[in-house]
Amino acid sequence: MTTNSLQAHFDAKIAADLSIEAKDWMPDAYRQNLIRQIGQHAHSEIVGMLPEANWITRAPTLRRKAVLLAKVQDEAGHGLYLYSAAETLGCTRQDIYQKLLNGKMKYSSIFNYPTLNWADVGVIGWLVDGAAIINQVALCRASYGPYARAMVKICKEESFHQRQGYEAVMVLAAGNDAQRAMLQDAINRFWWPTLMMFGPNDSDSPNSAQSMAWKIKRFSNDELRQKFIDSTVPQLEALSMTAPDPELIWDETTGHYRFGEIDWDEFYQVLKGQGICNHERLETRRRAWETGSWVREAASVHAKKMAARKNAA
Ligand code: BYC
């Protein structure tokens, strides 16, 4: 088949909403765009373990500790499904992981903010996992099959994470003045960074148009951000808490909340590595890579021995 007919076949599958699978022909730009997005997504899961893991040793009860441990382990699992999905596109896990460690690939900006108190853990589950679900439910219909299928399992677990986060903040909201103040403080610090998770406004998003044409993204950054705000503000009100946005108001005519301008300077500073925790997050991952070298070495020796035994049999 000529490149033109392969391209026509690919375009027809996208138009018909059929999945593109690993062995199918695909344009190189589609492949590279997916490696970029899936890789960034995988790195986000792995770096995203760190802010909450900070509280495992200080969880207020044994039950909270067990739940938090399980949640953080789930995030590691999400990273592994996503690295596997990226590998189906022909890149190696080692290569894209090195690109995380040397700063050539991004991870979600949200994980460059510190977790200062216990309420932050509940707020991450509720707001950050809540935002992730809105984004990821749409990705369950991404045109690339291995990415879409990984998303289905991830979304099931993220729903549980969001529920546990909301349950934790409900307890604080029903607590004493100090607990309610701690919760409000956590919401104040995480509200805007959570809105930034959806990426730049559509007019400033260089990848969106092509990703939507390829049906990798089904909704734009602004559409998903609006969906998140519309579904989250009633939850905020149910807690008798407020968002740190004086312009947040229900608009009868559009049937959506209107909200203030995001601080895009802050967003781009964080992307450039100037956020509060960028340095610490990458250093932690680099240290884990170095101190874990013996595990990789032992695993590869074991794999070689097993292969030799199989060949000899
Ligand atoms: N942070 O053209 P755009 C989780 C980058 S973890 C950092 O709109 P695109 C969890 C973007 O990559 C799950 N970078 O890009 C884990 C691009 O840069 P490059 C987190 C961002 O790809 C543990 C540039 O800005 N979810 O749930 O069309 C505990 C221009 O943007 C961000 C995902 O990773 C950002 N916020 O759309 C708890 C979702 N926003 O690559 C929870 C998967 C934008 O050109 N990713 N950039 O150098 C996506 O859905 C899309 O990649 C985005 C951006 C919506 C984020």
Image (cartoon, grey):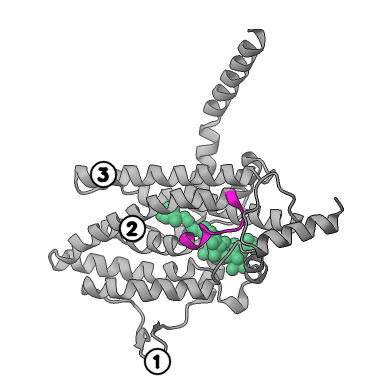
Q: Is residue 180 left or right of residue 215?
A: left
Looking at the figure, which quarter contains the C terminus?
top right
The residue nearer to you, when weighing 141 against 227, is 141
Q: Of tags 3 and 2, which is closer to the observer? A: 2
| Residue depicted at 42% across the width and 64% down the height | 131
What residue is shown with label 3?
Answer: 65
Of the numbered discs 3 and 2, the one sitting upstream in the chain is 3
Q: Residue furthest top?
A: 313
Q: Position of residue 312 (x, y in %)?
A: 66, 8
What residue is shown with label 2?
Answer: 162
Q: Position of residue 253 (x, y in %)?
A: 40, 92
Q: Residue furthest bottom?
A: 253
What residue is shown with label 1?
Answer: 253
The residue nearer to you, when weighing 193 against 157, is 157
Q: What amino acid is labelled 3 in the image?
A: Lys
| Residue depicted at 51% across the width and 40% down the height | 287
Q: What amino acid is labelled 2 in the image?
A: Gln
* Magenta-tinted stretch: 136-145
Judged from the image, the secondary structure of the residue bearing numbered disc 2 is helix
Distance from disc 3 to disc 2, alpha carbons, whole Å, reads 16 Å
**CB at disc 3 and ligand 1 closer than 8 Å:** no
Q: Position of residue 138 (x, y in %)?
A: 50, 63
